[in-house]
Amino acid sequence: YGELFLVEGNYMKNTLIGLGCQKEKIALQHIGVDIEKFTYRIRTPEKGEKVVILFCGRFIEKKGLLYGLEAVRQIIHKYSNIEFRIIGDGILKNEIIDFINTHNLQKYIVLLGYQPHRVFAEELEKAHIYLQPSVTAQNGDSEGGAPTTLLEAQACGVPVVSSFHADIPEVVLNGTSGFLVPERDSNSIAERLEYLITHQEIWHAMGREGRKHIELNYNIGKEIVKL
């Protein structure tokens, strides 16, 4: 019965249409980020410096963190100079800690707990790769659109590894600003992480394209005018 429905991407738009909403009532309105608050820089680790992978999200099924942890487990035997920094907490915390302990990942994983947004921004400054392996949960819960963290990571010039989920393929340019893999596919996540670790020369181009994509399409100043 509403007159206007704002959606952040075409996946959400098509979902609404599938529920019976008239497409004429739907308008695309991107989530915007304040790009001035996120410093863009070229990602080039110093010799001997750890490759820092960052995740931020609640410890719930749809965030897919366990698939990310399994991917990291698969590659550490070849690339031990990795640090996976995790911001968040939630109902799956015990399961996540059990996984880390069972697979002896303690020296590769840093659990930071819940943190204010400024800490996430600080962590992005240090990160080389941002990981967001979102999935559709067993109860149907999904991102709906895409996590704002993906916008912020790209605004900072951080290459992304994420999933073909909801509106993420519109937010992350697969093969250009990051890599997307099928949901729940730890093997593919591991393969893409390994590719980024062994091809650090592409980080600059991916970061540059990600920043440009956010400036053009998810800049809060432009989105406010549209709204």
Image (spheres, helix red, strand yellow):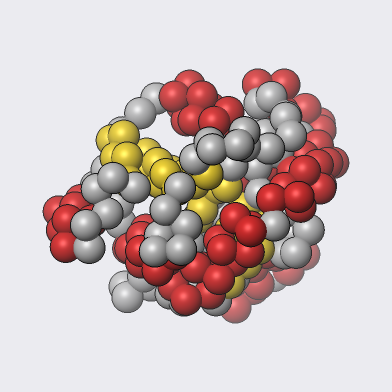
Q: Nearer the viewer, residue 26 or 57?
A: 57
Q: Is residue 53 above or below residue 44?
A: below
Q: Residue at x 31, y 73 (%)?
A: 139
Q: Nearer the viewer, residue 78 or 209?
A: 78
Q: Is residue 80 visible?
A: yes
Residue occupying image coordinates x 42% and y 53%: 80
- For the residue pair 102 and 130, the one nearer the viewer reads as 102
As rendered, which of 198 and 224 lies closer to the eye?
A: 198
At 31% from the left edge and 34% from the top edge, which residue is drawn?
A: 112
Q: Which residue occupies 22% across, 63% down?
A: 103
- The image shows a total of numbered marks equal to 0
- Residue 168 location, x and y as percent? 62, 60
Task: Say which quarter of the image contains residue 20.
Answer: bottom right
Place of residue 145 in the rendered image (x, y in percent of width and height, measured from the top left): 58, 57
Query: Looking at the picture, how far across and down is residue 51, in whole percent?
Result: 52, 44
Q: On the picture, is 49 further left or further right than 226? A: left
- Relative to 77, residue 124 above or below: above
Q: Is residue 117 left or right of residue 13?
A: left
The quadrant in which the N terminus is found is bottom right
* Left or right of residue 75, residue 23 in this image: right
Q: Is residue 125 above or below residue 48?
A: above
Residue 92 visible, this angle:
no
Most distant residue in the front direction: 48
Residue 40, horizontal then vertical, whole percent = 73, 29
Q: Quadrant of the C terminus?
A: top right
Quadrant position of residue 146? bottom right
Relative to 124, is 57 above or below? Answer: below
